[in-house]
Amino acid sequence: MLEGLQHIDQVITLWINDLGTPELDWFWLLLSDVKVWFAAYFLIAVYLIKRLGWKRGLVMIVAAALTIFLVDQTANLVKNSVCRLRPCYTSLMLEGGLHWSEGRGGFFGFYSGHAANSFAFATVVASALSLVKKNGFDRGLIAGAYTWAALVSVSRIMAGKHYLGDILVGAAAGALIALAVTWIAKLILRATEGLSPSVSPSNP
């Protein structure tokens, strides 16, 4: 059964990877560049403080930082435990026409840290904005964060660094860790404010 699932994963990954063109490599590599993420993280952090107030905003920013740390460490632990070779190190994938456009990196790719981090951050943003009555911009920001996460995840397949299975598991792991951390953050807010985090305060 596992061999069958792995074969399906390989076939779908090659199909998605084949949709890319060398002319668009720069776009996918840009999405994968963590330095680009920092600018987005900073702008969203500023918005959260403005939208939630400094106390709630700071708590959720700390939650985001803790989430990213936990996601990174968990991803590395799983990669070194499962030891599944990246597509760009797998002869079957290369012979099947896999296109890869950046340095191969470490040998193992299950699961994708990029997918985990991007979906974790999007989930933190959604959880943080659940503390207020969302306006149109908030909803757009949440949708944009998840769209960004999806594009970042696809970029890892286009770069030949991950299988679709690596992406799906990474996205789920990142979202679950984010939900756990933000749940604790909301408990802290409840204890310090004497309010249920689910109750929307007046807009700052």
Image (cartoon, rainbow, N blue to C red):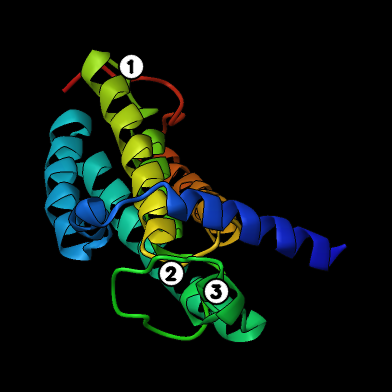
**Which one is nearer the viewer's eye here, 176 or 48?**
176
Q: Earlier in the sequence, mark 1 or mark 2?
A: 1
* Amino acid identity at mark 1: Lys
* Amino acid identity at mark 2: Lys
Q: Where residue 132 sits: x, y (%)?
A: 32, 23
Q: Circles 1 and 2: CB distance less than 8 Å?
A: no
Q: Circles 2 and 3: CB distance less than 8 Å?
A: no
Label 2 and label 3: CA atoms lie apart by 15 Å
Label 1 and label 3: CA atoms lie apart by 53 Å
Q: Is residue 25 visible?
A: yes
Q: Nearer the viewer, mark 1 or mark 3?
A: 3
Task: Indicate the secondary structure of the residue bearing disc 2.
Answer: loop
Q: Earlier in the sequence, mark 2 or mark 3?
A: 3
Residue at the extreme right of the image, as rendered: 1
The residue pinned by badge 2 equals 161
Q: Nearer the viewer, mark 2 or mark 3?
A: 3
Q: Where residue 197 sits: x, y (%)?
A: 43, 31
Measuring 37% from the left and 63% from the top, which residue is drawn there?
68
**Which one is nearer the viewer's eye here, 63 or 197?**
63
Above or below, 90 relative to 204: below
Q: Circles 1 and 3: CB distance less than 8 Å?
A: no
Q: Nearer the viewer, mark 1 or mark 2?
A: 2
The residue pinned by badge 3 equals 95
The quarter of the rendered structure image containing the N terminus is bottom right
Above or below, 61 relative to 144: below
Task: Indicate the secondary structure of the residue bearing disc 3.
Answer: helix
Looking at the image, residue 18 sits to the left or right of residue 10; the answer is left
